[in-house]
Amino acid sequence: MQVAGFLAPDLAAPGQRHFWDKIRQMRAAWALESRWSKDQILEAYLNLAGFRGEAQGIGAAALGLFGKTPDALARDDALLLAALLPDPQADAGTVARRACAVSHEQDCGRFAGEAASMLGPARSLALDPGLAPHLSDRLLTKPGLKVTTTLDRRIQTLAIVALKRQLQGLGGARARDGAVVVVDNASGDVLAYVGGIGGASTAPAVDGANSYRQAGSTLKPFLYAQAIEKGYLTPASILDDSPVQLDTASGLYVPQNYDRGFKGPVSARSALAGSLNVPAVRTLLLVGVDPFRDRLWDTGYRGLVEDGEYYGYSLALGSAEVTLLEQADAYRSLAQGGRWSPLRLTLDAPHTAPRAITTPQAAWIVADMMADANARAVTFGLDSALHLPFWAAVKTGTSKALRDNWCIGFTQKYTVAVWVGNLEGDSMRAVSGVSGAAPVWRDIMLSLNAEERGTPPPRPAGVEARAITFARAIEQPRTEYFLAGTGQSHIAFAPDESRRPRITNPVSGSVYAIDPDIPHDRQRLAVDVSGAVTAHRLWLDKTDIGAADSQPEIIAGPGTHRLRLTDVGGRVVDQVMFTIR
């Protein structure tokens, strides 16, 4: 009769307890008896009965309450589940007493603790760590569908173990979620797809591998590759890592480095390997925002649906949103000599012919820059989680307000992409790209290359090597790589004296607001100039405010003001307009 009620809910609707309702239920039960065996009726009952909360059926109950499949239940487990059936919402004491009665045993002391553990708040769904539940949800789109994925069970398992170990070490108060994607470079097959591991997550069902998150510094390799490809830069080119203010439609854009410090003149190699922000923005000024946005789109970043003006200069620092799967595919293209093709998740997915996006020479040079442990030592040190005992190109990234950690890198054979963060979007605590995602990346890479160590990819034709030195010894002599015909042996940069004198702060068009709660004489505006400014003077409106190299601080009243820089003959060599409100 209960199975009849499960199969036809109108026979067991709340309130239907009258004599005729029971007769209808009995008639339905007789119909079942005439067609089904007792074993079939019992099987249907176990698959339809409600056990606890939303757990319907023995399969859901066994997984949800014990982390096991029904065939793995011990006798005590089965007794406790049977004790739940009369009242699925009963407390632990009641369930323990019922289990004791069903067991017909004299000593039932153990049931109290077992029932409390089964129903306690710490109990959570425990799936086989070799499974990929997030990928299953993505691929199984209709009932009865069966697909064969490209996943490798061994690699999937080691990715889960590495991510789980790191998240447990960080603790839920610092970071709760993570995701891992491992790709075979040659075939494009996804060998591991970990969308999350549960644990302390507050959104365990969300697929972290396919969620759009802010990219941080992980887009910089493609920016430098484009600049090198176009001939705007070489790895030895000097970039100025110093404060810069850019006038945009929405106001001043003032990029900062992660450590809030500036390194001065640095090579492009050191700027990329050390993930310096200001040099990346200066590189974007060379390449152009729209061409860079288009290059990212061609490399598979399909979340960039707006034009370059929408992202602005912050695109160099990863203001766009990307998925971990897109990241893995884009970095794989660098490992494949700049050729991009979509990844494969199932064995029946077609092999798409790769498209040439970045030139093989630029892709190889950028990979060499990312693999240079010496170049990134100033920022990350020589013994960080990015250092491996074999060749690997790697880049980390941290998004605004510490919401996302990335670490993506590749050897000749594999690309490994890791994300760590909080899926709800809140900031992490005391976690950076090298301390959050990088240890997971390192553990997986070491496991993948335990038997066959990664080796540097062969240098393509069109790339030449030169022994170089730097003027003023800003960096150590080294062997550097150039596009054929662009090599140099001695790298020098323009000294301040050779630069055109100009005002660098304030930026023309700036608007400043006076705070009424701060004393007026404490609200001074610093004036900065660059270039050879000896014997030059600064004028605020019609007032001489002193020598240009004296770094004056000015107080200006409300209104529009003109700041001029004049040479020894009184000729205006630069001027800016700014407003005080």
Image: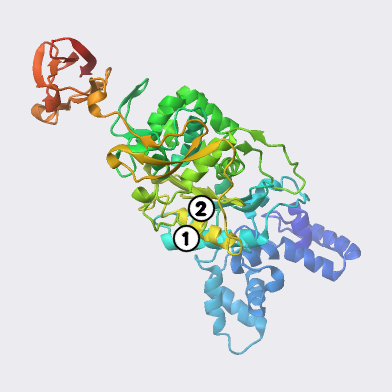
- The answer to whether 65 appears left or right of 504 in the picture is right
Query: 393 or 581, which lies in front?
Result: 393
Q: Estimate how packed mark 1 is, as few (under 14), some (14 to 19) or many (20 or more) residues with alpha carbons within 10 Å.
A: many
Element type at mark 2 = strand
Q: Amino acid at mark 2?
A: Gly
Residue at image point 43% right, 51% down: 373
Element type at mark 1 = helix
- Please state the horizontal and vertical placement of residue 260, each as a whole percent of the image: 29, 41
Quadrant assignment, res 58 = bottom right
The relative height of residue 96 versus residue 547 in the rendered view (above or below) is below
- The answer to whether 183 appears left or right of 147 in the picture is left
Query: 173 or 7, which lies in front?
Result: 173
Residue at image point 55% right, 27% down: 294
Q: Which mark is residue 571?
A: none
Quadrant assignment, res 31 = bottom right
Q: Which mark is residue 166?
A: 1
Q: Residue furthest right?
A: 34
- The answer to whether 300 appears left or right of 563 in the picture is right
The relative height of residue 6 versus residue 406 in the rendered view (above or below) is below
Residue 195 is at least partly visible in this image? no
The answer to the question of whether label 1 and label 2 lie on touching residues, with beta carbons closer than 8 A, is yes
Residue at image point 57% right, 56% down: 454
- Please state the horizontal and vertical placement of residue 281, each as a whole percent of the image: 39, 31
Q: Estimate how packed mark 2 is, as few (under 14), some (14 to 19) or many (20 or more) residues with alpha carbons within 10 Å.
A: many
